[in-house]
Amino acid sequence: MIIRFSFIEKIPPIFRNKYVLTIIIFVIWVSLLDSNNLITRYKEMKELHKLKIDKEYYIKRVEEDKQKLHELKTDNRNLEKFAREQYHMKKPDEDLYLILTPSEDRKITRKNK
């Protein structure tokens, strides 16, 4: 008494081949189930690209800051100008008036909260 499953007969013969079946299982495993699957790999490549762009930005920023630091160390006029602009320092006999744009005002009020 041979029992035949009807669903096996409906499968095309190429998919009944054990080698083809093994390759299909392998592809599914690598693309979806493995810890280094294609979806994770794509996300990591995107993150790597973003980090490379950030690295270039920060390298450029470090170079600019090195140049500014060199200017501040070599010239007292530049040091005084920097102190006045960044830290709102003034001489004892001067009055200091700050004129802020609305966006600068919002930044200051957010920092104080």
Image: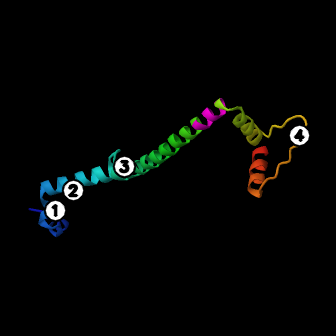
* Element under disc 2: helix
Between disc 4 and disc 3, the foreground one is 4
Above or below, comparing residue 17 to residue 98 in the picture: below
* Alpha carbons under labels 1 and 3: distance apart: 29 Å
First reached walking from the N terminus: tag 1 or tag 3: 1
First reached walking from the N terminus: tag 2 or tag 1: 1
- Residue at x 89% of width, y 40% of height: 94
Between disc 2 and disc 4, the foreground one is 4
Q: Nearer the viewer, residue 31 or 48?
A: 48
Q: Are marks 3 and 2 in contact (CB under 8 Å)?
A: no
Q: Amino acid at mark 3?
A: Arg
Residue 23 is one of the magenta-drawn residues: no
- Residue at x 55% of width, y 42% of height: 61
Q: Position of residue 89 (x, y in %)?
A: 81, 37
* Element under disc 3: helix
> Dot 1 corresponds to which residue?
15
Q: Amino acid at mark 2?
A: Ile
> Dot 4 corresponds to which residue?
94
Q: Are marks 2 and 1 in contact (CB under 8 Å)?
A: yes
Between disc 3 and disc 2, the foreground one is 3
* Element under disc 4: loop
> Dot 2 corresponds to which residue?
24
First reached walking from the N terminus: tag 2 or tag 4: 2
Q: Is the stretch drawn in magenta largely helix, strand or loop?
A: helix
Q: Position of residue 65 (x, y in %)?
A: 59, 38
Q: Nearer the viewer, residue 20 or 96?
A: 96
